[in-house]
């Protein structure tokens, strides 16, 4: 059996000339050709030093845009993203009504209304399958971090090999989302306050109340964050039921594959997915979504009474 060595970055663009891609050649070549044409047409009218003064910053900016990189992106892509961000509305809302025209006799400027937020999420099932309409369906898997620096070299090699084996088993794209989430200590403080009077010893009650006071002071004086890692497995095309079963199977395979890398992974239920989406849509909200939030399509029923059980 022969081995084939695969490059580390299989999505790297092909180099066309002088180690530059077609995109880089276009960014550098277009202003270069433009300056050359301008010199050929106006060279007899403008001194060469003027062309040099104009050409140096223009070509320098083109070379920087083509070659400079920040966070894995080229400078031209970052500038294009910044331009789109500046022109895009900063306030979005679901189902935003259309703005009504003000009467001509009203001398006032209407504030800008939120732009409509078009989410691709059509529905969320109880088992956590997110229906993305024509974009397929997805399942979210919560992953824990792995302490790497404290491991021995042999253990580190084993973790890398386990994670590499999972990556090599993929036959379709996945997304790893790493986000910083605010920690809400209010539920823990309230739980300690409720449990303190039930402690079997006064010393334990004082310790519980002191710890509750410490956590309350910590929440007021510090900006507490925790790292959340979500693996998004998506399936596109095909029948909806077949895509849902396929994405659930791939999520289960991801849980088993990441366990070999030392990470604890869990497929999120519909309520947990809805809570994560709500938190991601409004990260600065003070509202704490319930841990077992029902999915939007779930049927809410009351508790079963004794007569109904009989």
Image (tube, grey):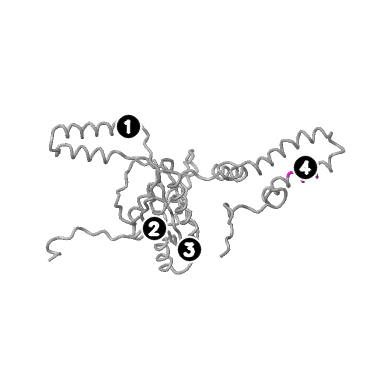
Query: Are dots 4 and 2 in contact, CB under 8 Å?
Result: no
The majority secondary structure of the magenta stretch comes to: helix
Residue 39 on image: x %, y %: 82, 41
Cα–Cα span, label 4 and label 2: 58 Å
Q: Could you say which is closer to the camera, residue 214 or residue 91? A: 214
In the figure, is residue 38 to the left or right of 284?
Answer: right
> Does 297 appear in magenta?
no
Query: Which mark sits nearer the N-terminus, 4 or 3?
Result: 4
Residue 235 on image: x %, y %: 46, 62
Q: Which residue is mark 3?
A: 236
Q: Secondary structure at mark 3?
A: loop
Q: Which residue is mark 2?
A: 256
Query: Which mark sits nearer the N-terminus, 4 or 2?
Result: 4
Q: Secondary structure at mark 1?
A: helix
> Does 33 appear in magenta?
yes
| CA neighbours of label 4 inside 10 A, class few (<14), some (14 to 19), many (20+) | some
Residue at 57% of width from left, 61% of height from top?
3
Cα–Cα span, label 4 and label 3: 47 Å
Q: Which residue is mark 1?
A: 220
Q: Nearer the viewer, mark 2 or mark 3?
A: 2
Residue at 83% of width from left, 35% of height from top?
48
Residue at 59% of width from left, 57% of height from top?
5
Residue at 34% of width from left, 52% of height from top?
272
Query: Which mark sits nearer the N-terminus, 4 or 1?
Result: 4
Residue 35's disc number:
4
Cα–Cα span, label 1 and label 2: 40 Å
Region in magenta: 31-37
Q: Nearer the viewer, mark 4 or mark 1?
A: 1
Cα–Cα span, label 2 and label 3: 22 Å
């Amino acid at each position: 059996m022969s081995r084939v060595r695969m490059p580390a970055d299989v999505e790297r663009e092909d180099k066309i000339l002088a180690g530059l891609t077609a995109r880089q050649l276009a960014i550098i070549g277009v202003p270069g050709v433009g300056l050359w044409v301008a010199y050929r047409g106006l060279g007899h009218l403008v001194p060469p030093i003027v062309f040099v003064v104009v050409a140096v910053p223009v070509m320098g900016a083109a070379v920087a845009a083509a070659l400079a990189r920040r966070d894995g992106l080229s400078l031209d892509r970052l500038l294009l993203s910044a331009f789109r961000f500046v022109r895009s509305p900063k306030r979005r809302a679901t189902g935003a009504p259309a703005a009504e025209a003000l009467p001509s006799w009203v001398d006032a400027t209407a504030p800008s209304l939120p732009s409509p937020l078009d989410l691709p999420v059509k529905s969320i099932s109880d088992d956590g399958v997110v229906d993305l309409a024509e974009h397929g369906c997805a399942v979210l898997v919560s992953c824990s971090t792995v302490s790497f620096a404290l491991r021995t070299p042999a253990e580190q090699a084993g973790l890398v090999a386990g994670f590499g084996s999972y990556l090599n088993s993929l036959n379709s794209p996945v997304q790893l989302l790493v986000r910083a989430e605010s920690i809400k200590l209010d539920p823990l403080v309230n739980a300690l306050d409720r449990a303190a009077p039930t402690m079997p010893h006064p010393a334990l009650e004082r310790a519980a109340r002191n710890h509750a006071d410490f956590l309350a002071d910590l929440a007021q004086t510090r900006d507490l964050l925790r790292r959340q890692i979500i693996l998004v497995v998506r399936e596109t095309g095909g029948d909806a039921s077949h895509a849902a079963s396929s994405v659930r199977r791939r999520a289960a395979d991801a849980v088993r594959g990441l366990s070999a890398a030392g990470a604890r992974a869990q497929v999120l239920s519909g309520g947990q997915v809805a809570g994560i989406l709500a938190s991601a849509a409004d990260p600065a909200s003070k509202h704490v979504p319930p841990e077992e939030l029902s999915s939007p399509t779930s049927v809410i029923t009351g508790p079963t009474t004794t007569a109904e059980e009989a």
